[in-house]
Amino acid sequence: MIPNVVPARLKAWHLALGLSFFFQACAPAYIPNAVNVPMHQEKGEVAAAVNYGTSGFDPQVSYAITDNVGAMLNASFRNDPIDTNNNYHRHLFVEGGLGLFKWTNENMVLECYGGFGYGNINAHMENSLFTSTAKVNGSRIFLQPSVGFKWKNADLALVNRFALVDLRQGNERASALFTEPVLSIRVGTEQIKLVIQTGISIPLHEGLAFAYQPFLINLGLHIRPGKFTL
């Protein structure tokens, strides 16, 4: 069975308060990765980022195909070795997307990206109270509208990623739609900035059939090396 730790009638807003305890004992079948927020301004711009946090190591790259169309490629990796309690976690996830961006003035940009990703999780968590195992293959369709604000030495973006997650474990299959509001802050120079992201992943229906990581917390670097015209 895909691991289930959420009671059928537990409301989504209770999860943010209670799942921090559950997650010490459960192997999540869905882990939201860091959000890629390109904030491109013109054709040919390249941006890249490396992030580390609740989803492991998340590299990202994006490219402005035109003055209003962008593409992105994201990944997420984690490989925790077996510890003294036989607990471990390994996952790999890769996704790609396309989107539109429009600057309303010199400081504000509207973006909307959508795409598809695929990956797998192999994890085992055990303690004196719980034992949970996840060996899951899964896909995700996402739609990611955002509003961003850019200044000389800082960027700020408010993102709400909608994620349709489909998971398979053996003959079992489960799907769920999540909303994932995220705040992304970048501080530094024009070429390189420190990134801090924080957010939450919330299922949009009751009776969730699998465990998941409810928090998005990441720290990283965002790099803008310049323009590259195809």
Image (cartoon, rainbow, N blue to C red):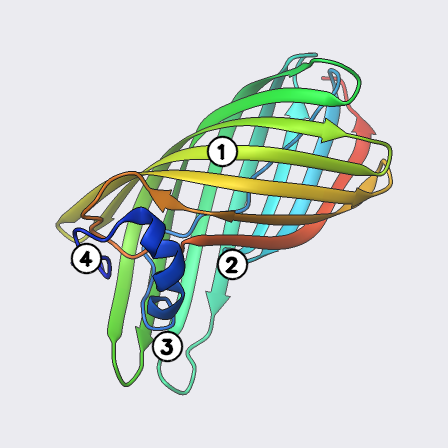
- Compare residues 94 and 165 and report the one nearer the observer: 165
Looking at the image, residue 138 lies above or below residue 124? above
Mark 3 vs mark 4, CA separation in Å? 24 Å
Q: Residue at left 24%, top 40%? A: 205
Mark 3 vs mark 2, CA separation in Å? 17 Å
Residue 93: image location, x then y, percent: 44, 47
Task: Answer left or right for 162 relative to 3.
Answer: right
Looking at the rendered structure, which numbered label has been put on residue 54? 2
Mark 1 vs mark 4, CA separation in Å? 25 Å
- Compare residues 58 and 182 and report the one nearer the observer: 182
- Helix, strand or loop at mark 1: strand
Q: Earlier in the sequence, mark 3 or mark 4?
A: 4
Are dots 1 and 2 in contact, CB under 8 Å?
Answer: no
Q: Amino acid at mark 4?
A: Pro
Q: Label 3, on which residue?
A: 87
- Helix, strand or loop at mark 2: loop
Are dots 4 and 2 in contact, CB under 8 Å?
Answer: no
Mark 4 vs mark 2, CA separation in Å? 23 Å
Give the crowd class for mark 4: few <14, some 14-19, many >=20 residues within 10 Å. Answer: few
Looking at the rendered structure, which numbered label has been put on residue 160? 1
Are dots 3 and 2 in contact, CB under 8 Å?
Answer: no
Q: Amino acid at mark 2?
A: Thr
Indicate which label's residue lies in the foreground, 3 or 4.
Answer: 4
Residue 56: image location, x then y, percent: 53, 58
Q: Earlier in the sequence, mark 1 or mark 3?
A: 3
Q: Amino acid at mark 3?
A: Asn
Q: Label 4, on which residue?
A: 7
